[in-house]
Amino acid sequence: MNTMLARHPICGPLTKGGSALLARQYDLEPEAGYVDECRFCYLVRRALTDRLPEYLGPRQVYGFEE
């Protein structure tokens, strides 16, 4: 894996272990009720928008208003 990609706070965990690893790395337990892996990944990234705004945006993508 590309070293720069591996160090990226979002892409690194996603490419190494998927959204489950991303959630574990940031001690997240997304809200219940996701229907598939894509929804789970969305909820994990949404939960991280305030912690990592420089990587996850714009906020409107995750249903937040500016």
Image: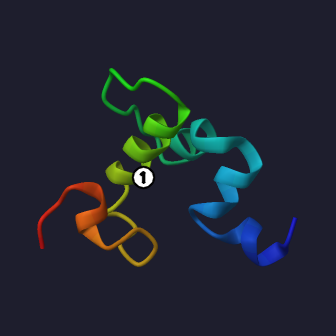
Q: Which residue is mark 1?
A: 45
In the drawing, does residue 32 fall left or right of residue 17? left
Q: Quadrant of residue 61?
A: bottom left
Q: Residue at x 34, y 52 (%)?
A: 46
Going by the picture, which residue comes out furthest to the right?
1
In the drawing, does residue 41 fall left or right of residue 8? left
In the drawing, does residue 7 fall left or right of residue 61? right
Q: Residue 4 at what x, y percent from top left? A: 76, 77
Q: Residue at x 66, y 53 (%)?
A: 13
Going by the picture, which residue comes out furthest to the left?
65
**Helix, strand or loop at disc 1?**
helix
* Type of amino acid under label 1: Arg
The colour mode here is rainbow
Q: Residue at x 39, y 26 (%)?
A: 34
Q: Residue 28 at what x, y percent from top left? A: 42, 39
Q: Residue 15 at what x, y percent from top left? A: 73, 53
Q: Residue 50 at what x, y percent from top left? A: 28, 63
Quadrant of the image containing the N terminus: bottom right
Quadrant of the image containing the C terminus: bottom left
Q: Residue at x 58, y 42 (%)?
A: 19
In the drawing, does residue 47 fall left or right of residue 37? left
Query: How many marks overall?
Result: 1
Q: Is residue 8 above or below residue 40?
A: below
Q: Is residue 3 above or below residue 27?
A: below
Q: Is residue 14 above or below residue 17?
A: below
Q: Quadrant of residue 29?
A: top left
| Camera-side residue of 33 and 10 | 33
- Determine crowd level at label 1: few under 14, some 14-19, many 20+ residues with C-alpha closer than 10 A: many
Q: Quadrant of residue 56?
A: bottom left
